[in-house]
Amino acid sequence: MKKLSLLLLMLISCTGVFAADPTVQMDDALRANGRIYVVVTIIAIIFAGLAIFLFAIDRRVRKIEKGN
């Protein structure tokens, strides 16, 4: 748990470095065309699929561990 909190703290502290240029041309173009919502939806679907896959694997591993 300590390692996870340290990792999160490091990630949060580095966000200022990555947000140095707030005006990205690609971002403006996607917003103007309305395609940013498509990109965000696809990314959300991918993350949801990965989360479901990981929970399914975790459930199977727990079942196998209880059997032994």
Image: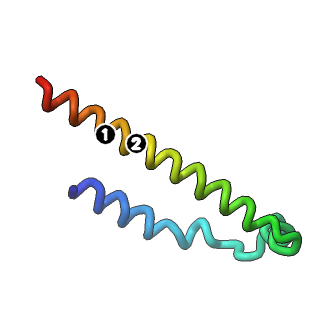
Quarter residue 68 falls in: top left
Q: Secondary structure at mark 2?
A: helix
Residue 66 position in % (x across, y down): 13, 32
4 over 55 or under it: above or below: below
Inspect the image, locate mark 2, and give the three-letter code of the amino acid beneath it.
Answer: Leu
The mark total stands at 2
Q: Residue furthest top?
A: 68
Residue 67: give its label.
none
Q: Quadrant of the N terminus?
A: bottom left
Residue 21 position in % (x across, y down): 71, 72
Mark 2, residue position = 54
Mark 1, residue position = 58
Residue 4 position in % (x across, y down): 29, 56
36 over 60 or under it: above or below: below
Q: Secondary structure at mark 1?
A: helix
Inspect the image, locate mark 1, and give the three-letter code of the amino acid beneath it.
Answer: Asp
Left or right, residue 21 beside residue 35: left
- Asked if marks 2 and 1 touch (Cβ < 8 Å), the reply is yes
49 over 9 or under it: above or below: above
Left or right, residue 60 beside residue 39: left
